[in-house]
Amino acid sequence: VWEIANSGEAAFRPLYPDHLSLKDKIETVATKIYGAAGVDFQPGVTAELERLESFGMASAPVCIAKTQYSFSDDPKLLGRPRGFRITVREVTPSAGAGFVVVKTGSIMTMPGLAAKPAALNMSIDADGVIGGLM
């Protein structure tokens, strides 16, 4: 990939420039990649995006968490629907990784994590013996 990208033959270009606002980055991904007609932001999300920008995350890329069944946030709209609206319900910074996680629909950001994580069954007794791993 590195060689092709630097060969002068690749036509790669970023989807959006770093200087675009976080809100505009979300709208760009939703409309140009997912096929959405637009994006709806639940109350408080726009203010949170502005807060993240004021904390120095304005140039961060966005990572959109959505259903695995569709390019929409609705698992019933299978495949690549067109003309739908996607709803952003929450945004959270992943400052160490350098991006902003955009949560849509009822998505969990850790797929496969049980409602009761196995770590809750773990214990260490007075002798240092660990239990509850299996």
Image: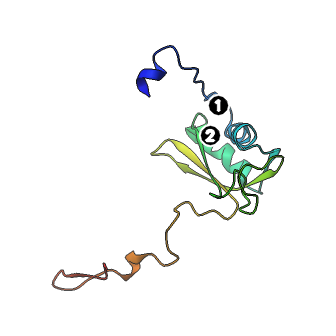
Q: Residue at x 15, y 84 (%)?
A: 127
Please state which of residues 98 and 116 is positioned toward the viewer in this rendering: 116
Question: In this rendering, which labeled residue sits more in front, label 1 or label 2?
Answer: 1
Name the side, left or right, on which 126 lies relative to 116: left
| Secondary element at image label 2 | helix
How far apart are the alpha carbons under marks 1 and 2? 23 Å
Residue found at the very far front of the displayed protein: 79
Q: Tell me the kind of residue under disc 2.
A: Ser
Q: Tell me the kind of residue under disc 1.
A: Leu
Please state which of residues 7 and 101 is positioned toward the viewer in this rendering: 7
The x, y position of residue 125, in whole percent, is: 22, 85
Name the side, left or right, on which 117 lies relative to 34: left
Label pair 1/2, CB-CB below 8 angstroms: no
Q: Quadrant of the C terminus?
A: bottom left
Label 1 or label 2, whichever comes before in sequence order: 1
The x, y position of residue 70, in whole percent, is: 69, 54
| Secondary element at image label 1 | loop
- Graded by Cα atoms within 10 Å as few (under 14), some (14 to 19) or many (20 or more), the crowding at tag 1 reads few
Which residue does the numbered mark 1 point to in the structure image? 15
The x, y position of residue 47, in whole percent, is: 72, 49
The mark found on residue 54 in the picture is 2
Q: Quadrant of the N terminus?
A: top left
In this rendering, is residue 121 above or below 103? Answer: below
The quadrant where residue 131 appears: bottom left
The x, y position of residue 95, in whole percent, is: 49, 46
- Graded by Cα atoms within 10 Å as few (under 14), some (14 to 19) or many (20 or more), the crowding at tag 2 reads few
